[in-house]
Image: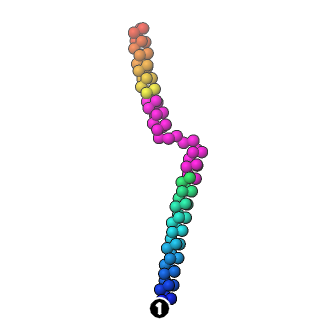
Amino acid sequence: MQSKNKIFDDLSQLMTNAMGVAQGAKDEANTAMKGMMDRWLADRDFVTREEFDAVRAMAQKAREENAALEARIAALETDAK
């Protein structure tokens, strides 16, 4: 009876170790995949959200300034007539 328990204990220990190795492999694969994706994205010259928002704000300001200048030009043209 003692040998059966020893076999089960050894089998249980083996399975526990195998699960630990599998978890470690999964974590390592996730880390490697994340690193590959980060490098791929960096190579594509994508802009960050902050950069996009800054350029968007600059474009909006330029449109508003254009509209104001157009209004001033129109007013000057009507005054000149």
Q: Amino acid at mark 1?
A: Met
Residue at numbered disc 1: 1
The quarter holding residue 46 reads: top right
SS category of the residue bearing label 1: loop
Q: Quadrant of the C terminus?
A: top left
Q: What secondary structure do most residues of the magenta stretch adopt?
A: helix
Q: Which residue extends farthest front?
A: 2
Q: Which residue extends farthest bottom?
A: 1
Asked if residue 5 lies in the magenta stretch, the reply is no
The answer to whether residue 17 is left or right of residue 65 is: right
> Residue at image x 55%, y 60%?
28
| Relative height, residue 78 to residue 61 (above, below) | above
Task: Count numbered badges in the picture.
Answer: 1
> Residue at image x 50%, y 88%?
3
Question: In this orientation, which residue lies closer to the viewer: 69 or 28?
Answer: 28
Residue 13 position, x and y percent, is: 50, 77
Part of the protein shown in magenta:
36-60
